[in-house]
Each structure stands twice: as C-alpha cells, then as structure tokens.
Amino acid sequence: MKAKLAGFALTAAGAALFSTKAIFIKLAYVENADAPQLLAWRMIFALPFFLAVGAYALKRRRTMGVPSPGSRVIWGAALNGIVGYYVASLLDFEGLTYVTAQLERLVLFTYPIFVMLLGWLFFGGRVTREAVAGAGITYLGLAVVFQSGVASEGWTTAIGTIFVLCSALAFAVYQLLAKTFIAAMGSTLFTAVAMSAASVTSIVHFLIASGGAVHVSIPYLALAAGTAVFATVLPSFLMNAGLARIGPQSTAMISTLSPLVTIYLAIVFLGEVFTPVDAIGTALIIGGVAFYTWFDMRTKTVSATS
C-alpha cells in the first residue's frame, strides 16, 4: 500500500513538473524570444544528466553480462531522439512565441490521438469506435479553445497552433518508433542516447544559426536551467519511478491532470485569461484523451489476461 501511495505521489509530482515547461519558456521569452537559443540552453543544462545516466546504464549492462547494443541500434535510437526531442521541441518552442501556455499544453496533450492514427496507418494498429469517439471529443474541445484564442489574440493563434500540432505529431512518431529500441537496449539507455543526440543537435543548430555569438542575461540562463532541470530531467525520473510502482494505466490517468496545472500556473505567473469558453474546451480535451487512454489501457489489460 505504501509503495502504491508513493507511486501516485511520484507520478503526480512528475506530471506537475512537466507542466511547468511552458511557464519557464514564456518567462524566458520576456528576456529573449529566440526559440533555437532557448532550446539549446535547455539542452546544455540537461545534457550532463543524460550522459551520466547513459554511462551508468552501460556500466550496469556490463556488470550484468549483457552485451552492448550494436551501432545500428544506437544510431537508430539517436535519430529517433532527434525527431522526438529536437524537432518536436523546436516546433513547440516556436509555437509558444505565438500562443498562450494554456493553448500550447492543450494542443500537445492531443498527441495520443496522433499515436493512434499513425499506428493504424503505418504499424498495423487498430482503430475502435471508442477511440474515434475519444478523438472526436478531444478535437471538438480543441476547436472551442482555438476559436477562443483567435477571438482574443487574432490569427497568429493559427500559426502557433500549427507549430504545436506538428510538434505533437513528431512526438507521436518518436513514441511509436521508441518501442523497438527500448526492447533492444532498455528504457534507461535508450532515453540517455535519444536525449543526448537531441541535445547535441540542438546545440549545434544554435551555434550555426547564431555564428557563435551568445548574449544572454543571468535571469534568462536561470530560466533555461529551470526548464532543463525542473521541467525535463527531474520529472522524467519521477514519472519512471511512479510507473514502476503503479503501472502504465494509473500513470496515464494521473497525467491527464497536467494541463490543469499548466492552466493554473499560466494564470498565476503569466497573467493569462481563462474564460468559461476555455473551460468548456479544456474539459472536452481532457475528457476525450482520458476516455481514449482509459479504454486503450483497459483493452490491453483484457487482452493480456485472456
């Protein structure tokens, strides 16, 4: 019982910390609204953690007599990490220059629907009536929030929403491909390789784009470090620790609270407005994703026990 309670607490803490990412980014944009630069600094601060984790994972494999994965697997994991954490993050950071933190989080939250659709189109996945219903509810809610954003912020909302939707699509591709690499090298080593590759790519991109000229303030660096440590590295470990104690179904359901945390923080720290229309759209989005997640997990549980 204690282990389960600890799992719920760890998962909730991880989901809440993940929710702070958009807040850190928006505050950093007050100093300098350059998406590639902020992404590079985020990865500079996060990279040492992932290198250390990767070294530990390799050492543990050798101690246990498990052979190291081949170069083809490592390069594949690295490329997948670039798609999931460089391309997706860059699109997300660009989107946040146009839309509110609330809308960004809600749009990103729809990525499980992309996982379902891409899995059906390219990986032999199955689409059920319940999944279609969940997707319909989700995108109805997104349309409501999007319309509210256009009414208050203008059509730049459309530009930002497209960027973030493309980010969700890239992350869905990463999730679908990650299963193969995790099976071959384990989740810890895969995460370290994927994130390290994305970090290096982000840093190289910025150095090439900027010509090596770096001018940033101390508050900006502090916010970039906060994005790396509190919204990237720490929640990753907390979520994995919670997953080990309570399983994927409970973890997925607790994670549906994440957008609500972002909305609250955006109102408190960024002064964003949350209208009754936004509340309706948010309820539809969270409800649709939660319904799809619950039904998907329930179906897998039944299949595994039958």
Image (cartoon, helix red, strand yellow):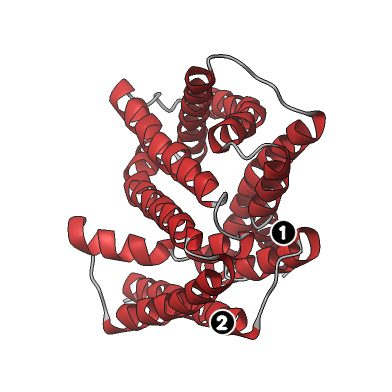
Circle 2 residue: 283
Q: Along the line of sight, which residue is nearer the eye, 50 or 265?
A: 265
Q: Residue at x 42, y 61 (%)?
A: 111
Res. 2 in view: no
Q: Residue at x 62, y 40 (%)?
A: 33
- Which quarter of the picture shows residue 280? bottom right
Q: Secondary structure at mark 1?
A: helix
User: Do the CB atoms of the residues marked 2 and 1 lie less than 8 Å apart?
Assistant: no
Circle 1 residue: 13
- Which quarter of the picture shows residue 233? top right
Q: Along the line of sight, which residue is nearer the eye, 63 or 55?
A: 55
Quadrant occupied by the N terminus? bottom right
Quadrant occupied by the C terminus? bottom left
Mark closest to the chain's N terminus, 2 or 1: 1
Q: Residues within 10 Å of mark 2 (few under 14, many from 20)?
A: some
Q: Residues within 10 Å of mark 1 (few under 14, many from 20)?
A: many
Residue 77, placed above or below residue 13: above
Q: Amino acid at mark 2?
A: Ala
Q: Residue at x 71, y 62 (%)?
A: 266
Q: Is residue 216 left or right of residue 55?
A: right
Res. 121 in view: yes
On the image, the x and y values in percent for residue 137 come to 41, 82
Q: Residue at x 65, y 19 (%)?
A: 214
| Label 2, label 1: how far apart the Cα atoms are | 22 Å
Residue 194, placed above or below residue 158: above
Q: Which mark is residue 262?
A: none
On the image, the x and y values in percent for residue 207 come to 53, 19
Q: Secondary structure at mark 2?
A: helix
On the image, the x and y values in percent for residue 285 come to 50, 76
Q: Amino acid at mark 1?
A: Ala
Q: Along the line of sight, which residue is nearer the eye, 305 or 8?
A: 8
